[in-house]
């Protein structure tokens, strides 16, 4: 394979990885808040990504207002961080998560969000440490186990990745992410991040729109 093809393949895999991470952050965000309050998103399949970006930008504005009223609102800092992960602004997200941790270091979702942001920055060892913090606070946090598995895959540690996915499945047998990741890892030895395809991404965005529309 020539260098051009390798570069294109690498870019494609990076894009897919980032989309998967942002999807995880999105699911955490809507699981802790009324999704209909995040944004009023029109059901337009041709402009889904633009609508989603606006939705998360509006979410950040909402959280900034809450922070202005109460700078010690850890939930607002957390939600802002998750929205920033979704918008692929990991450096800003980490600043928000760090503030949330400073206020309340015992929130498992905050540490999970920080781990996702660190994966976006390719800081996999640091991401694992963040996921471990999340798991120590809440061992039943399947999102943290999923994220930890992805970080281990990125470090080319498939055995450790499978252990993390197994734990996520043990906690939630219906965890489609962990099931998919483990299957692609054990059956093809191709990283789950790279095994995702465009159809999966399309479905992911459609799910975002459906949830946001309530």
Image (cartoon, rainbow, N blue to C red):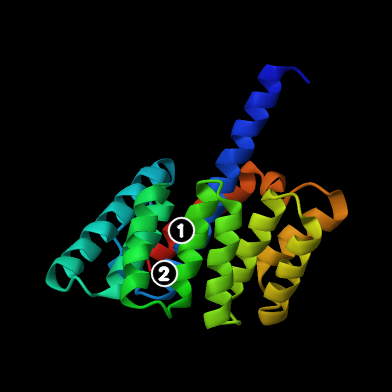
- In the image, residue 101 lies at what x, y percent? 37, 71
- In the image, residue 203 lies at what x, y percent? 57, 53
- In the image, residue 6 lies at what x, y percent? 70, 25
Q: Nearer the viewer, mark 2 or mark 1?
A: 2
Sequence-first tag of 2 and 1:
2
* Residue ID at (63%, 39%): 13
For residue 208, which numbered disc appears in the image?
Answer: 1
**Foreground residue, 74 or 6?**
74
Residue 201 visible in image: yes
Kindly indicate the quadrant of the structure image that contains residue 146: bottom right
Residue 1 in the image: above or below residue 59: above
Residue designated by label 2? 30
**Residues at marks 2 and 1, CA–CA distance in whole angstroms:** 10 Å
Horizontal side of 91 relative to 131 (left or right) equals: left
Horizontal side of 120 relative to 51 (left or right) equals: right
Horizontal side of 169 relative to 50 (left or right) equals: right
């Amino acid at each position: 394979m020539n260098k051009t093809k390798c570069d294109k393949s690498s870019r494609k895999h990076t894009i897919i990885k980032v989309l998967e991470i942002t999807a995880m952050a999105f699911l955490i965000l809507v699981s802790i808040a009324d999704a209909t309050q995040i944004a009023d998103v029109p059901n337009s399949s041709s402009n889904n990504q633009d609508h989603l970006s606006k939705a998360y930008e509006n979410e950040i504005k909402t959280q900034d207002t809450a922070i202005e009223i109460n700078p010690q609102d850890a939930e607002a800092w957390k939600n802002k961080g998750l929205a920033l992960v979704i918008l692929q602004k990991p450096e800003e997200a980490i600043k928000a998560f760090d503030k949330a941790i400073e206020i309340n270091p015992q929130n498992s979702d905050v540490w999970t969000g920080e781990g996702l942001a660190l994966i976006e920055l390719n800081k996999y060892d640091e991401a694992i440490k963040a996921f471990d913090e999340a798991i120590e606070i809440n061992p039943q946090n399947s999102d943290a186990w999923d994220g930890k598995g992805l970080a281990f895959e990125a470090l080319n540690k498939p055995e450790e990745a499978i252990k993390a996915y197994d734990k996520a499945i043990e906690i939630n047998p219906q965890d489609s992410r962990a099931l998919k990741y483990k299957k692609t890892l054990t059956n093809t030895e191709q990283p789950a991040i790279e095994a995702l395809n465009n159809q999966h991404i399309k479905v992911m965005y459609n799910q975002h729109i459906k949830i946001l529309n309530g």
